[in-house]
Image (cartoon, rainbow, N blue to C red):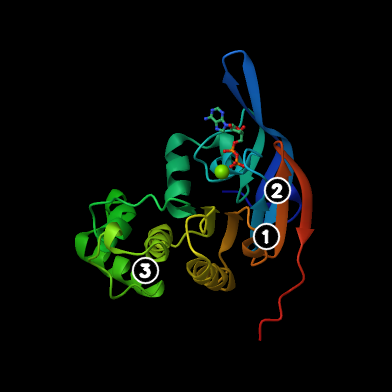
Amino acid sequence: MSTASDHTGNADTVIRVEGLYKRFVMGDTVVRALDGVSFTISRGSFVAIMGPSGSGKTTLLDILGCLSRPTEGDYWLAGSKVSNLSDRQLARVRNHEIGFVFQNFNLLARSSALVNVELPLFYDGVRRRERTQRAIAALTAVGLENRLHHCPNELSGGQRQRVAIARALINSPSIIFADEPTGNLDTASGSSIMGLFENLHQKGHTIVMVTHERDIAEHAERIMSFRDGRLVTDEWLHPKHSN
Ligand SMILES: Nc1ncnc2c1ncn2[C@@H]1O[C@H](COP(=O)(O)OP(=O)(O)O)[C@@H](O)[C@H]1O
Ligand SMILES: [Mg+2]
């Protein structure tokens, strides 16, 4: 991969999008889910994406996470133009650079926390003993070392989201995309998940998190707000004085 500075003039840039459009054709109508979006995100930053329902947040995150492609426009991830990557290269980027956390956790209902977290390693061909060791370490890191063999329905919402975060972290991705990670959680569980994200940010991970709650967004350093598929405000928050 070439360095980001080739394209952006800034080696710290990990994400750059230029003139991004996503249109969905629904019968006679065209939905403009993204309507000309351009921005950059620096490596190691913690960004919140806000906006009302239907403003294009999930559409954007899916493109940034390489789960879908724009109708028009360019996306550079860590200096590589995503549209130029082969399927194989794209799969590698998805498995190793990117971790995804969803609002509804997306866990296998009948499998234990341990099996859920091991799954990406299984697909990656990692041997059983190493899978287990790494999954235990990831679950310990999110405070679930005493829940390894519990299935999702034996865990609280906050604990389920912790399992999902452990799974997202299992391959040490540099970037974590989270789509409304606290949307299904009570306030206390939501704050503890934000505590985990702040730790990850301090360790140098880049975090891009969608939320429609202002107090959740304020855990980030920067808030980008969308409306009707357009970026309408982009604000940098003052550093927090937490201690
Ligand atoms: N697969 C799809 N097919 C058709 N329309 C879609 C699809 N995905 C999203 N949309 C539309 O695109 C717009 C943006 O959706 P979305 O990105 O999910 O918004 P948000 O996450 O901000 O609520 C909405 O009007 C939605 O109905
Ligand atoms: Mg959404």
Contact between marks 1 and 2 (CB within 8 A): the answer is: no
Q: Secondary structure at mark 1?
A: helix
Residue depicted at x 39% and y 63%: 166
Alpha carbon of mark 2 to alpha carbon of mark 3: how far? 35 Å
Of the four image quadrants, the one with ligand 2 is top right
Alpha carbon of mark 3 to alpha carbon of mark 1: how far? 29 Å
The part of the image, by quadrant, that contains residue 52 is: top right
Q: Which mark is residue 6?
A: 2
Residue 243 placement (x, y as % from top left): 66, 86
Residue nearer the viewer, 23 or 228: 228
Kindly report which numbered mark, 1 or 2, lies closer to the viewer in this rendering: 1
The part of the image, by quadrant, that contains residue 74 is: top right
Q: Earlier in the sequence, mark 2 or mark 3?
A: 2
Q: Which residue does the numbered mark 1 point to in the structure image?
A: 214
Q: Going by the picture, which residue comes out furthest to the front?
A: 186
Instruction: Using residue 139 as the reference point, say whether residue 21 is left or right of it.
Output: right
Q: Which mark is residue 80?
A: none
Residue 137 placement (x, y as % from top left): 33, 72
Alpha carbon of mark 1 to alpha carbon of mark 2: how far? 35 Å
Q: Earlier in the sequence, mark 1 or mark 2?
A: 2
Contact between marks 2 and 3 (CB within 8 A): the answer is: no
Against 211, is 54 above or below? above
Residue depicted at x 42% and y 65%: 158
Q: Going by the picture, which residue comes out furthest to the bottom?
A: 243
| Count of marks, rendered view | 3
Against 27, is 163 above or below? below
Q: Which mark is residue 138?
A: 3
Q: Earlier in the sequence, mark 3 or mark 1?
A: 3
Residue 175 placement (x, y as % from top left): 54, 57
Q: Residues within 10 Å of mark 1 (few under 14, many from 20)?
A: few
